[in-house]
Image: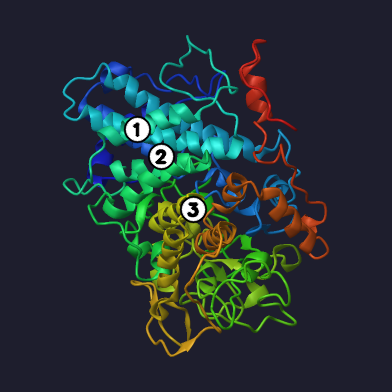
Amino acid sequence: MKKINYKFLIPVSLVLFLVIAACSKSFINKPPLGTLSPSILASETGVQGLLIGAYSLVDGAGAAGDGTQSGTSNWPWGGVASDDAYKGSDPSDDADVAALEDWSIIPTNGSLTSKWVVNYAGIQRCNDVLKVMRIATGISDSGSIAGQARFLRAFYHIELQKVFGNIVYADESISPTNINFTNTAPVWPSIEGDLNFAIANLPDNWSSTGEVGRANVWAAKALLAKAYMFQQKYAAAYTLLQDVIANGKTAKGDKYALMPHYFSNFNPAQKNSPESVFAAQTSVQDGSSVDWGGTPNGDYGDLLNFPYTAGPGACCGFYNPSQDLANAYKTDATTGLPLLDTYFQGLNVSDPTTPYVGTLDPRIDWAIGRKGIPYLDWGPHPGDAWIRNPGADGHFSPKKNVYAASQKNFTDNGSAYWAPTELVANNINLIRFADVILWAAECAAQAGDLNAAMGYVNQVRTRAANPTGWVYSNSDYDAANAIYKTQTTPADNYKIGLYTSFPSQAYALEAIYHERRIELSMEGHRFFDLVRWGIAGTVLNAYYDRFRATMPLKKNAHWTAGKNEHVPIPQSEIDNVNSDGKKRLVQNPGY
């Protein structure tokens, strides 16, 4: 969230620069880089400035040691690590991420450190807010400020927990004189405590100030529900989710709702919509750095994830949707329902030689760039001409993070230098309302209320079935509204229907799991969902078996239960923190 309130951000930006932390013995104990003491910041303006600094890392960029792997789109950790996507580019390019595609990752992998340190930097900034508040004077709404800081602290801890598993819960009591911490204690109770405090102290909305990126009570309830989902506390999550669905509002004060058209959720012109529960805020052409080592406000984490050589951006061919994901959009020609158990059988969708010609869920062409299908207003996707290495990357391009040709130069940084053209003003969806609805469906199914579960799933499918939101051939793309103007010829043989029954709990859960995959594809959730459902080994190893012979990075891939639920703790952090002989960090099992 690089920008919240532009007018407010400018006066405090110099203050924030001076309090950026430098590296010391521990990833947690980082003394101030500048010479400003907490007493100088102990005012409403100073504390709000520190809070903006805490928000600024929500996108996963802007701290020492960041990188494309640390972005909260989680494309390596939630996408490449799953069956949704290939790393992309050449196999040797960014080999650290390639290790997630076949689960050969080891503790010295460099991508681990970037994810680890950026989130702990965010946690430290939250703790700085809380510590300085204690000596500050003249603060008009200390509860709201503390609520936001603790919401963000919970968010950063959840990011760490779902990737690394055994982490340190770092509250403001940890300091250079108190380094008694460990990563062997459970962190969920502390995360829940932070979020319950946030719920008790955050406002209903921020409409009075227009600060659309700040967390409100509804975002806090949704994030607490997410924490419960990861712990299989379905009843507690369901109570919160029902409240959020019935009464929740955005920070702007809009009632939560599904947007009429699916791709509006990924359109820079429509961000902070009624479907946005919590998002990393982005901006471009705002004077922030666009070169390596800077802290740009665009979506830095997805910098590499554009078609290769042409189209939006100018590089680099990473994060290609997988063939398995494309096949998951197959539907039954009669009912329009997903082929839950058989989607991977038969011909491949858009196979270059013998393609599948059956019916498809229309969301495929908003999530995946496919040959011959309109790619927003960039023209038909040319196929392998936009793929850096088809033998390793497949035949598809990412789509949800890009911008339309008609949006170029005001939603990107408008430069010939390749990196700025890929820094876009498209918010990163961290929780959107469709996510909330499908969590509720899962909770209802777990409780045995299969009719309610089906109703929630059908809400999401009804939006997808609206033909005004499909991709059309021979039609101008309306970038302002994320639709095609002439809706005569659908771009493919689309067929999507609603469920009429969930005959069993097992069927309901399978349908919900599949719906989450195709609704939220390429948004960084897939691997974490597979792990929390307890089916990662079954799903991923079957996926590897299907593609060993055709995809180089799948040849030796294997997912190991009891180990690969999480990645290793960075070895450099273990060595650093334990260098005095006291064992504070221990490595995850199996690594």
Left or right for 557, reference 493: right
Look at the numbered discs 1 and 2 and tell me whether their residues touch, using CB distance below 8 Å. Answer: yes
Above or below, 510 relative to 309: above
Of 293 and 126, nearer the camera is 126
For residue 224, which numbered disc appears in the image? 2
For residue 196, which numbered disc appears in the image? 1
Instruction: Please state the horizontal and vertical placement of residue 532, each as a whole percent of the image.
Output: 58, 45
Q: Is residue 551 visible?
A: no
For badge 1, the amino acid type reads Asn
How many numbered dots are placed on residues in this image? 3
Q: Earlier in the sequence, mark 1 or mark 2?
A: 1
Instruction: Please state the horizontal and vertical placement of residue 100, each as a whole percent of the image.
Output: 69, 47
Of 3 and 287, nearer the camera is 3
Above or below, 345 relative to 456: below
Of 280 and 314, nearer the camera is 280
For residue 238, which numbered disc appears in the image? none
Above or below, 141 relative to 366: above
For badge 3, the amino acid type reads Gly
Q: Earlier in the sequence, mark 2 or mark 3?
A: 2
**Marks 3 and 1, how far apart in space?**
27 Å
Q: Residue at x 68, y 27 (%)?
A: 587
Q: Residue at x 28, y 51 (%)?
A: 248
- Screen quadrant of the C terminus: top right
